[in-house]
Amino acid sequence: MKHWLLKTEPTTFSIQDLAAAPSQTTHWEGVRNYQARNYMRDDMGLGDRVLVYHSNADPSAIVGTASIVRTAYPDASAFDPKDPHFDPKSHPDAPTWFMVDIKLDRIFAQPLSLNALRPVAALKDMELLRKGSRLSVQPVRKSEFEAILKLAGRG
DNA sequence: GCCAACGTTGGC
DNA sequence: GCCAACGTTGGC
């Protein structure tokens, strides 16, 4: 089982939106970066655990966890000219972009902000905390995932 | 709103 | 294949 971090802007789709979704499950659509795509398409497995991160938020923070409940399949939003993530170069017979489905596990009682995470020794190599890190789908080490859960407590 | 960091595009 | 220009991300 692997561990991941998924970024989302809460003004677009928040973990509260995930909690309100049918079966607390959603398609993680709109990823338009090749490295992020490759992680989703090639490496994500059923049952992998996910940290949900709110970017461009106040404060930006890890806000909860989810699990992969469906592995990669074509991202149909790329085929829709009216969709903000439309990509004319992606065709249904040879899709460029993929998505997975995730299901909410829990929302942390206290969001873990970047300021709260930076001083944690166990997280010093975490991709999220690297300067200039922009990748919206990131692998997370098991030790990092467990450290995050510990910080989040049982609430 | 600023701007650094990064990815993509396209002329050559 | 280089690389300048441009667009996007995202913390602050």
Image (cartoon, coloured by chain):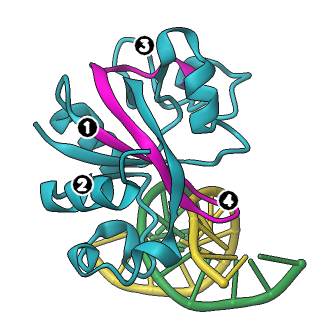
Chain colours: A cyan, B green, C yellow
Q: Chain of mark 4?
A: A
How far is disc 4 from disc 3 in space, using C-alphas? Answer: 34 Å
Q: Tell me the kind of residue under disc 2.
A: Phe
Q: Tell me the kind of residue under disc 4.
A: Ala
Q: Mark 4 vs mark 3: which is more N-terminal? A: 4
Instruction: Give SS at disc 3.
Output: loop
Instruction: Give SS at disc 2.
Output: helix
The C terminus of chain A, quarter of image? top left
How far is disc 2 from disc 3 in space, using C-alphas? Answer: 35 Å
User: Is A83 rendered above or below residue A146?
Assistant: above
Q: Mark 2 vs mark 3: which is more N-terminal? A: 3
Q: Mark 3 vs mark 1: which is more N-terminal? A: 1
Q: Tell me the kind of residue under disc 1.
A: Arg
Q: Which residue lies at the image location 64% right of the left edge and 28% below the top edge?
A: A17
Q: Tell me the kind of residue under disc 3.
A: Pro
**Residue A92 badge:** 3
Of discs 4 and 2, which sits in the foreground?
A: 2
Label 1, residues with CA under 10 Å away: few <14, some 14-19, many ≥20: many
Q: Are marks 3 and 1 in contact (CB under 8 Å)?
A: no
Residue A6, image x, y percentages: 42, 46
How far is disc 4 from disc 1 in space, using C-alphas? Answer: 22 Å
Tell me, yes or no, whether dots 1 and 2 are on the same chain: yes
Residue topped by disc 2? A145
Q: Looking at the image, which is closer to me, A137 or B3?
A: A137
Q: Which residue lies at the image location 69% right of the left edge and 33% below the top edge?
A: A84
Range of magenta residues = A49-77
